[in-house]
Image: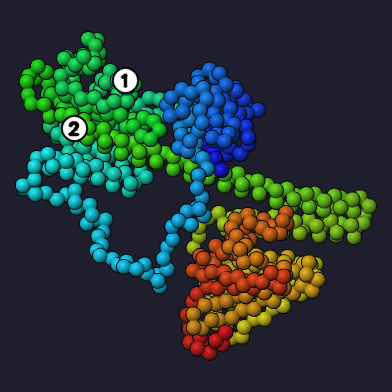
Amino acid sequence: MASLFVIHGHDQGKRFPLDAAVLSVGRDASNTIQLQDSEVSRRHAQIAHTEQGPSLVDLKSSNGTYVNGQSVQERILRSGDRVQFGRTLLIFTGNEDRSSIDLLEEVAIIDRNRPAEGSRIVSSISQEEGSRIVCETDPATSPWLARTRSNLQIMYQTALAASHTLDIDQLLQRIMEFIFEWVETDRGCIMLIDRESEELTPKVFRHRRAARDAEKMRISQTILDYVLEHREGVLTSDAKTDERWDTGASILKMGVREAICVPMQGRYDTVGIIYIDTYTPPGQMIQNRQINRFTNEHLKLMIAIAHQAALAVEDTSYYSAMVQAERLAAVGQTIATLSHHVKNILQGIRGGSYLIEEGLKLSNTDLVRKGWSIVDKNQEKISNLVMDMLTFSKERQPERIAADLNRVVADVIELMEVRAADADVRLLWQPAEGLPLWTFDPEALHRAILNVVTNAIDACEKSGDGCVQVWTDYDQPRQVAVVAVQDNGEGIPEEEIRRIFSVFESRKGSRGTGLGLPVSQKILKEHRGEIRVESTPNEGSTFFLEFPAIAAGPTTETMSELPSG
């Protein structure tokens, strides 16, 4: 589906699907796409779907509508277009013209058992070996070719650094190190634009030893304004004779002799600048003639480096925005789901409390008991919900102790007998004989088994002759302890088996929290185990909770006497 994704502005990270025939954009709450931006008009623009694609129309807004940096009144949007309303920048993503299904008709992968005729591997090369092409030198190589190879090596190293880190500060430090290796500069600084204040903020500063006693680095505002306004890199070797600077410019007052300043221009915007210069020690006249260190070739190289750095900064910023958006969406879903379940539980408690109150008024003991039974059941529900939330919300290491697996399962059976009876479901328990003490976290395993048995009972409620069988076993060849829970309920379609372990995916409707099975799976994984599921629709399901059988101390020798399962 076509959509607009906010990459800069107050609503950064939000995605707006273009799922209506006509959508309005503006600051007012009545708009389909509402932007929290004071520079966006109340009714700023409109997007309408046409045969040519989504048509963006400016509704005579105060600050205008821009696509790819150009002011527009009406424009058909194409995938990848940058759309700007006020200070909010969005990326338009359209539907692909061709689906992957269409492409499969033109591209085929030959089965490995039937290789294509005449197809064979002639040679292979690793990425490391491939990169050496930019490092090879030949004494007979022409100076031009040597310079070209050197520049290619610089760009390769810069691109490699940009692709290997999501830490902006670390990346900028590395890029400044590259610049000092490749360019004969005395001082350098990288500044990024703060998106809130729109001001340049220094992020990296570096100088050579010869310039370490220099006074505080002062950068001409004239140069910065020119670079940001024109989006061009500048090289100045003699500010006094440069027609770009007027006589009152700060660059002349500061006596800057040689400097390079380039914009960090990304895909969508300028994210900052890179500035380098040469330092003239105090007492030396700026008019003293000396060989210039910087050339146009250095300027071109710095522009290319700055572009690579800007792409990395943008990628990291947008990745962070998407992660934040997904995190907020997950938090919203969690709150909504849990609030729904807590509300249902509180309604149950309120209903039970009402019966207790009425029973006390009428001195009706049966009514009090009935009310208390309702309250008690809902207390158990909210207790289970809280425990599942705590278990799922944090990583933990199992508190392994020597424990009896049969005893743990028996406790679960005893706890669930009343619930099974209320649901008119038979609960059968078959412990394996001769199981030794194993090392595991009995409290955590108790919770995992309880969730699975609860689900099995719920699955059998409507079957008429519901039956849940629970047994333990030891798989000697794999040295795995097994707890199996089998029911004759409605079963699970094959395509839904994976989904049942997803958070908040419940097949019980409003009765389920969607946390039980994910919590059980998490506990088994913490024990380096797993949950296997075998299910047939309309016949029932079997859940196998398996984890490594780690014998407890001196009982190890009893393993050979165990049944093979």
Q: Are marks 2 and 1 in contact (CB under 8 Å)?
A: no
Number of callouts in the render? Answer: 2
Q: Quadrant of residue 512?
A: bottom right
Q: Secondary structure at mark 1?
A: helix
Callout 1 crowding tier (Cα within 10 Å): few <14, some 14–19, many ≥20: few
Q: Secondary structure at mark 2?
A: helix
In-image side of 251 versus 61 (left or right): left
The front one of 198 and 128 is 128
| Residue drawn at 22 percent across, 52 percent down | 131
The front one of 489 and 197 is 489
Q: Mark 1 is on which residue type?
A: Asp
Image quadrant occupied by the N terminus: top right
Residue 561 in picture, x, y percent from top left: 53, 90
For residue 145, the mark is none
The front one of 500 and 353 is 500
For residue 298, the mark is 2
* Whether residue 36 is visible: no
| Residue drawn at 31 percent across, 35 percent down | 307
Which mark's residue is nearer the viewer, 2 or 1?
Answer: 2
The front one of 335 and 50 is 50
Callout 2 crowding tier (Cα within 10 Å): few <14, some 14–19, many ≥20: some
In-image side of 145 versus 52 (left or right): left
Residue sitting farthest toward the front:
117
Image quadrant occupied by the C terminus: bottom right
Q: CA distance from mark 2 to mark 1?
A: 21 Å
Which callout, 2 or 1, points at the residue further toward the start of the chain? 1
Residue 327 in picture, x, y percent from top left: 53, 45
Vertical relation: 274 (above or below) 376 = above
| Residue drawn at 7 percent across, 26 percent down | 291
For residue 225, the mark is 1
| Residue drawn at 49 percent across, 80 percent down | 479
